[in-house]
Amino acid sequence: FPVTINEMDVTRSSIKSIADHVSKASPVILGDTLKDLEYVLKHKPNGLMTGKQFLQKVTTILVAENTCFIIPLYEDLASKRIVGFHPVSSLGSKIFRFNDRDWLEYRVQVGNENKKFQIPLEEVGILRDHYYKDDYYGESNDALHPTLEVLNVQNQGIVEGVKQSATIRFMMKLSAVLSTPAKYKEVRDKLNQLNLSSDNNNGIFMYDNQFESATPIESKPFTIDSDQSNGIRNVVFNYFGTNEKIIQNKYTEEEFTAFYEGRIEPILIQISEVLTNMIFTKEDVQKKSMVIYESSRLQYASNKTKLEFVTAFTDRGILTINQGLSVFNLPPVNDGDKRYIRPVS
């Protein structure tokens, strides 16, 4: 297929929109074990990325390839103490069996080199989408390729149509057959220089008896059927679980809630589960240690909705003053962690 899934505007904007919304989530480690990794996930998962960039990269790889590997970074190979995480593309990777263990071979761009690394598969976090036939990988995006082919052809047609409508201005019929293609080009260029260059400022078009007739071509802007174009784009939006309002940030509260619950939340849950299994033992998880990603849908609500929410929950002692301020992205105040219950009159 000549165009990859992230090289077309409609697919790239769909993927980026999902990744941007996922990256707004904040990691929290529950329990008392390995709390230092909360700072790592939030601020510096590896030497190249912030926490937001980490989530953007993980989500982009997952949505574009349907499989994303998270590689643990160790303090040293002896202790296997995790001190960071690095997302890796599934492209060019392979899983093989060695000494009764599954291993992952993956590629990372280091400078100008594409280097190969290997790691036991049980140490790797694997995120999958369209998870069906293969035990290790999500399905390919082949189902979308026919639509991308149509979009590619459509875009090429628009370019060619614009070029043609902008350049062909006259149809000239010669009174005699010329000997070679080069002669046709010579005659055409001379006519163009005489009549269509910037030197011709009097508006008069002239030709001799070398031509039998001259017919002006009405230049019209090239357009495509908007319904057909929108239908094709909607196929892409449906595939990725988004829509034009989300991409263009024109959504209502209800529309974003549906998008969050249907597309963003499942990704955050999967990332939380994968990181939990990477970091904690079975015994830790049984003691309620886990990684969760918090993302409040209230940040997308109107100020009216936020005010109603904060007023109702603060008056009932559910929220503190500082928690209410955080809904409006305001800084905490001194003595703001107390709870108040308004007396019923």
Image: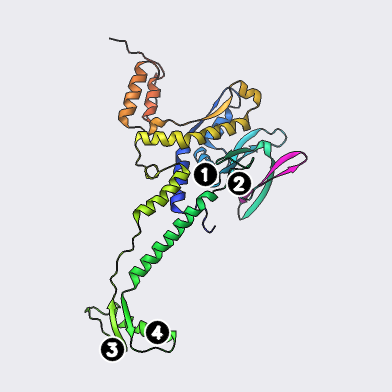
In this figure, what is the number of numbered marks? 4
* Disc 3 from disc 1: Cα separation: 63 Å
Circles 4 and 3 in contact, beta carbons < 8 Å: no
Judged from this view, the residue extending furthest toward the left is: 202
Q: Earlier in the sequence, mark 3 or mark 1?
A: 1
Which percent across, then down, holds residue 311?
33, 21
Task: State which mark lies toward you, 2 or 4.
Answer: 4
Image point 63% across, 53% down: which residue? Answer: 114
- At label 2, the amino acid type is Ser
Write down the quadrant of residue 334 in the picture: top left
Residue that numbered label 4 is attached to: 184
Q: Earlier in the sequence, mark 3 or mark 2?
A: 2
Q: Earlier in the sequence, mark 4 or mark 3?
A: 4
Image point 29% across, 66% down: which residue? Answer: 220
Residue that numbered label 3 is attached to: 208
Residue that numbered label 2 is attached to: 90
Kind of element beneath mark 2:
loop
- At label 1, the amino acid type is Val
**Does residue 96 belong to the magenta stretch?**
yes
Which percent across, then down, holds residue 332?
39, 25
Circles 4 and 1 in contact, beta carbons < 8 Å: no
* Disc 1 from disc 2: Cα separation: 12 Å
Stretch of the chain drawn in magenta: 94-109
* Disc 4 from disc 1: Cα separation: 53 Å
Give the numbered dot on residue 63: 1
* Disc 3 from disc 2: Cα separation: 67 Å
Circles 3 and 1 in contact, beta carbons < 8 Å: no
- At label 3, the amino acid type is Asp
Which percent across, then down, holds residue 137?
61, 43
